[in-house]
Amino acid sequence: MSDQPGDNPPESGKIEQEEMPFAVVQGRAVTQLPKDLYIPPDALEVFLESFEGPLDLLLYFIRRQNLDILEIDVAAITEQYIKYIEAMQAMRFELAAEYLVMAAMLAEIKSRMLLPRQVQEDDEEADPRAQLILRLLEYERFKDAAEDIDQLPREGRDTWSAEIALPEMPKKVEPPEVDLRELLVAFSQVMHRADMFRSHQISLEPLSTRERMSIVLDRVRSGEMVPFAALFTPEEGRMGVAVTFLAVLELVRESLIQLSQTEMFGPIHVKARDS
Amino acid sequence: MSDMQQIRQVLEGALLVAGKPLSLDQLLHLFADAEQRPGREELKAVLEDIETDCAGHGYELKRVASGFRFQAREELAPWLTRLWEEKPARYSRALLETLAIIAYRQPITRGDIEEIRGVAVSSNIMRTLLEREWVRVVGHRDVPGKPALYATTRLFLDYFNLQKLGDLPPLNEIRDLTEINPELEFEGVDLPPEREPSEDVDSLEEVEADDESELSTIGEEADEALAGDDDSALQ
Amino acid sequence: MSDMQQIRQVLEGALLVAGKPLSLDQLLHLFADAEQRPGREELKAVLEDIETDCAGHGYELKRVASGFRFQAREELAPWLTRLWEEKPARYSRALLETLAIIAYRQPITRGDIEEIRGVAVSSNIMRTLLEREWVRVVGHRDVPGKPALYATTRLFLDYFNLQKLGDLPPLNEIRDLTEINPELEFEGVDLPPEREPSEDVDSLEEVEADDESELSTIGEEADEALAGDDDSALQ
């Protein structure tokens, strides 16, 4: 590996010998793109797109020379890379910024190599070649890993999950569970909200009356006349009877039931209103 | 591997993964290679073989109109149905509010509920409450449109362990709940805002250390997502 | 039908109809009845039995990250691929490289990936990986911009027929540079944040599926997956 890459001008024979030929034409290896050969821009584009970035392109150059990454002559690779970039630019091909950054970096490495070697005063300044080689090595690991992953048996390409038919099955859905506290919080919040939007308070009848209203309504629901007296359960005592009575009055007030009496002091009948 | 055995394996594999019945022609089409391709009779014989071998297994080879398919055995339905058993979803806030209003203000029309809640009550909510038999129609108010009057049921009381509606806390106590709500923090009442997994994780180390809780967070989110879906379905 | 035989049939049926991997917990959940429910060990024994019986058939019982699934044998792919009109998706090198870097270096930011690849990672690639649910955001690094940290998912492992990250093909070793090329001054060079690959994978195993308590952990995680119905995206 040459430590003085600057000695090799780009067109030097040494590099040409190392290069793998692009093609063999009439028995002669062609190592350089003929300058007069028209390459359709599309083809170049395809060529560039087959590389996953500047590191990939550099790896390609190294591989083309059958070299171990660790053995590369950074300067020679730099020459190739920059020639490639120049060719692309000559084709007025739009290069991704990364390629140009890499070109600049390579150029910098090369120019440093040209300078007389100095004892490194600043220990922290790293050898840029080493830095590049490490990046190439690291990238190559993942490039290989990507190929390995691509080889793994893949669902839908190499393997398929069994999915056979079901027999007739009844669908059952579990209804959600509700905690009473959830219900109370919901109510408190809705009442709170209602308070804020209203100037008047919603007054609630004692629950027992409202419940009794439901019960009475249920009794008369069928539409038939129910004897008024039958709505009362004497065993409940005075309070119970009073609650039922209040419920009936409230239902009448809300026009939910009708009371009818066919004759004076005759039995009173209760009927749901027109339903 | 004998030819027969290979044909059999191909058929088994295809019928298991196809996800639909396969006709004899489709099965034959699997063998592109003319030499390798079995005859129809041979194919039928192999299928019969496969069918016989299903005995004692959890699946069977069925012949349906469009061809052959593997199917799980009918007798397994009670177990298999559990695979799709949906986690009990949560009821929406709207549904709980509606139920609470019916409980406290019954008998009540939908219009009344809407007036209290300030928003429309969806038909789905009413249907859910009626299907669950927590609420029923006890009559109709004698006004234009004859709106139904809703009341709670015996089942409602049973479910919430109440003897009678009077066991529900009185309104003034309920109002206090609003103030103490933050302390109650019972599950399911207030869903926490969805949290981006480990948004507070700052370094690599923490990420790895935290991953246990990460996974559970993801799980919860999935649950919530599920609950949310069902909710919307219920509404 | 003996109990054992019934358990076996239920497991077979469930694994065949599920269309996705089922964890041990999910399998246990099939048996609602406490009396009928097998123990974990019993369940594992039955699964082993089922696995053994797959020999010579066109399918196998495969264990992947989220649980167990029946799948057609890999060797049958040349035939079975004819079942579908469409060719299986091919993924670009860029996508596979990005995926590989995330798999081996997780959790990792997009910037880190770009650093390794030397080229910008297109948003399309990240979106595809996220949409396929092979990759998810597990946190944010505490640096300006708070870049997202990416990691692979269980679905990624399932898709590639892996149980845990440790089953990935090992990363090539980085050679001892100073020895091979002493001339180059590697000292002071910023080595890429090199964690030992093996160590890497170990800690990640813990992240994905702690293999100590393997079965139970996998089970719980898979339950979550079921709840979220993660698989639907892949089907």
Image (cartoon, coloured by chain):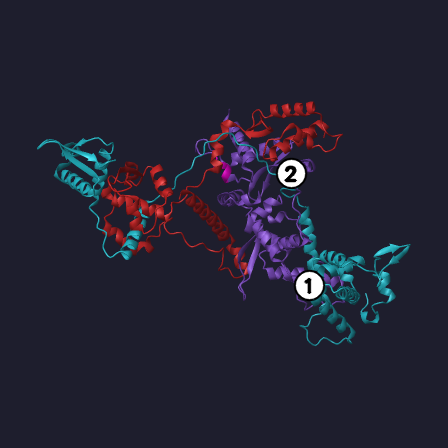
Chain colours: A cyan, B red, C purple
Relative image position of residue C135 (x, y in whole percent): 57, 52
Q: Marks 1 and 2: in contact by CB < 8 Å?
A: no
Mark 2: amino acid: Trp
Relative image position of residue A142 (x, y in whole percent): 67, 55
The quadrant where residue C55 appears: top right
Instruction: Say what secondary structure mark 2 lies in.
Output: loop
Name the dominant secondary structure of the magenta segment: helix
Is residue A98 left or right of C41 when viewed as pictured? right
Name the residue tied to disc 2. Answer: C84
Q: Where does the C terminus of chain C fall, quadrant-wise? A: top right
Seen at 67% across and 69% down, the residue is C188
Is residue C152 left or right of B168 when viewed as pictured? right
- Compared with C196, C45 (above or below) is above
Relative image position of residue B120 (x, y in whole percent): 34, 48
Tag shown at residue B195: none
Q: Chain of mark 2?
A: C
The quadrant where residue A13 appears: bottom right
Q: Is residue C202 visible?
A: no
- Compared with C62, A135 (above or below) is below
Instruction: Say what secondary structure mark 1 lies in.
Output: loop
Relative image position of residue C185 (x, y in whole percent): 73, 68
Tag shown at residue A96: 1
Q: Is residue C80 visible?
A: yes
Mark 1: amino acid: Ala
- Disc 1: CA contacts within 10 A as few (<14), some (14-19) or many (>=20): few
Is residue B124 left or right of C143 when viewed as pictured? left
Q: In front: C70, or B30?
A: B30
Which residue range is magenta in the image? C25-30
Taking the magenta stretch, the answer to whether it contains residue B6 is no
